[in-house]
Amino acid sequence: MQRIAVFTSGGDAPGMNACIRAVVRTAIALGKEVYGIRRGYAGLIEEDLFRMEKHTVSNIIQLGGTILQSARSTEFLKPEGRRKAYEVLKKYGIEGIVAIGGDGTFRGARVFMEEYPDIAIVGIPGTIDNDLYGTDFTIGYDTAINTAMNAIDNIKDTANAHNRLFFIEVMGRDAGFIALRSAIATGAEAVLIPEEKTDMDELIRMLEYNYHHKKRASIVVVAEGDDAGGAFQIADQVKARCPQFDIRCTVLGHVQRGGRPTCMERVLASRLGMEGVRALLAGTKSVMVGEVHRQIVFTPFEQATKHHQKINPVLIEMVELLA
């Protein structure tokens, strides 16, 4: 294998640039040519790719987002789209791809390799949600929880100044990892996540108990995918039953996806990028490269996308006991 490519796909995540840098420089150090594909599968179909050199990835390790950009491709879901992608790869002599993304990226890669087994793809987990099976942490997660933590700390200052109850919504449509860790780190009174059914009666009981015991300022962290609704919907339900509360809502939104990646993020992303290239050149394919207990592990795409990271029940207990 002399020529490989790299792309980022799905939602962007801080640390993706550090991973791109590691892929490019590792491949070049091992005597290989590297092409960057802009906008993931969409860019591949449209032949939006270019040769990358060491200087191409200079001064990007500290940047959020992705210099290769990202997009979702409905065309790649169709056999005709995948055929176009294959023809582009053959035209450029590309035999292997390092795909940085989430479960949708890996599902697409698995189908593509079933149809075109002469192309090898390895995946690197890049998503702030940290919900992929086969790695302790995904690229983007550490930065996202630190961004959420800092924002909640700031909100807590004003909550204390005005004796207010804040509902703060963080990202996590299908997973509550961001909500859970940021809640623990900020001393939130409660956390609502998709993995646990929300008991509104219990939530209100706890908030009223705090209120009557002179704890007037409270923080409730809500994952956007919680079964009871988003922060505004839950706040409306609480206000209807507890009119004495001075309630405010904040949705952190896409601020969690941006910003400079943390030190831990950059190191993880660099290691996974390096190991992804090594795996590809060693003949490994159709796997996600992850880190479990500080060791590199390879998880087949089918397993990585079928299963999801489990919430540690101890973390939920911590929120309840330490509130």
Image (cartoon, rainbow, N blue to C red):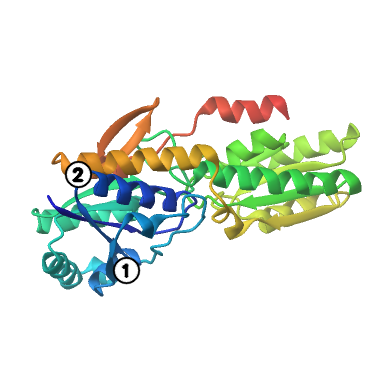
SS under mark 1: loop
Question: Residue 228, position in %: x, y?
Answer: 60, 50
Q: Which residue is mark 1?
A: 73
Question: Residue 33, position in %: x, y?
Answer: 21, 55
SS under mark 2: helix
The front one of 231 and 297 is 297
Name the image quarter holding the C terminus: top right
Query: Does 209 sit left or right of 126 as displayed?
Result: right
- Tag 2 or tag 1, which sits nearer the N-term? 1
Under mark 1, the amino acid is: Ser
Residue 202, visible in the rendered structure: no
Query: Does 193 sit left or right of 127 as displayed?
Result: right
| Residue situated furthest bottom in the rendering | 46
Q: Which residue is mark 2?
A: 280
Query: Does 262 sit left or right of 185 as displayed?
Result: left
Residue 144, visible in the rendered structure: yes
Query: Does 147 sit left or right of 98 as displayed?
Result: right
Neighbours of disc 2 within 10 Å: few (<14), some (14-19), many (20+): many
